[in-house]
Amino acid sequence: MLKRLLLATAIGVALSVVLVFWVLPGYLPDSTDEPVRDFSAVGGDFSLETLDGPIERADFEGQVVMLFFGFTHCPDYCLANLATQRQVLSALEEHEQGQVRGLFVSVDPERDDLTTLAEYTDFFHPDIIGATGSKSAIDAMTEQFYATYYFVDTPDSELDYLVEHTTRTYLLGKDGQVVDLFTHDEPYTRILSRIREVL
């Protein structure tokens, strides 16, 4: 009885080894292949205001755009993101300059007038555009990009309120379509490398 049990166990182990090392690999994707990331449903046309006038997605045709939603009174993520955008833009080679822009969209138009936005983004880099719009325009755009934002009262603060918002960066290709997403702590070198693939 024990011999039969041991024999059955040995056969089971042998079959498992065959399955794992010879059969399954033929049905699994190559581990070296990059996963397909489809962003075709993310993004769309938009219409915003800047200090230099209205802008829309078509105005960036032929350029790669780093898009971020935030607000100028943001104490952390917005500052970090714009600093990253500055690093990317400053690292571009001469032949790449002018083909990449940053776009900072304020979801707090009540406090972020166009002059404030322009001064805020210019502090980081002249190729970063500060834009905003009416609440309906912002809501339409954030919905298209699957971004969120909401206001949080801070009665014990001089700011009165803060805005919780999506902290990812959207990379738009030359046709205005989203081609990649980056987390708030993505190294600028990773973003720069991806931009060069898109250019």
Image: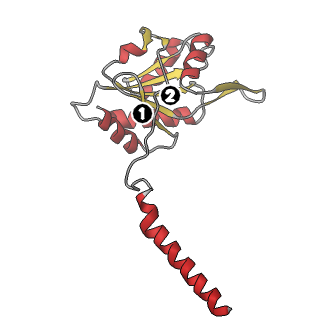
Q: Is residue 25 above or below residue 158?
A: below
What amino acid does circle 1 point to? Gln
Secondary structure under tag 2 reads strand
Mark nearer the viewer, 2 or 1? 2
Q: Is residue 63 left or right of residue 143?
A: left
Q: Earlier in the sequence, mark 2 or mark 1?
A: 2
Q: Is the Cβ of the residue at disc 2 closer than 8 Å to that at disc 1?
A: yes
What amino acid does circle 2 point to? Phe
Q: Position of residue 1 (x, y in %)?
A: 68, 91
Q: Is residue 142 left or right of residue 173?
A: right
The colour scheme used here is: secondary structure
Q: Is residue 167 left or right of residue 124?
A: right
Residue at screen point 61% across, 88% down = 6
Residue that carries the numbered disc 1 in the rendered image:
85
Residue 107 lies in quadrant: top right
Q: Position of residue 91 (x, y in %)?
A: 31, 38
Choose between 42 and 49: the one closer to the eye.
42
Q: Position of residue 86 (x, y in %)?
A: 40, 33
Residue 100 lies in quadrant: top left
Q: Is residue 146 above or below residue 19?
A: above
Check the image and name the residue furthest to the left: 95
Choose between 36 and 135: the one closer to the eye.
36
Residue at screen point 36% across, 18% down = 60
Residues packed near mark 1 inside 10 Å, few (<14), some (14 to 19) or many (20 plus): many
Residue at screen point 38% across, 13% down = 58
Q: Position of residue 114 (x, y in %)?
A: 51, 12
Tag on residue 68? 2
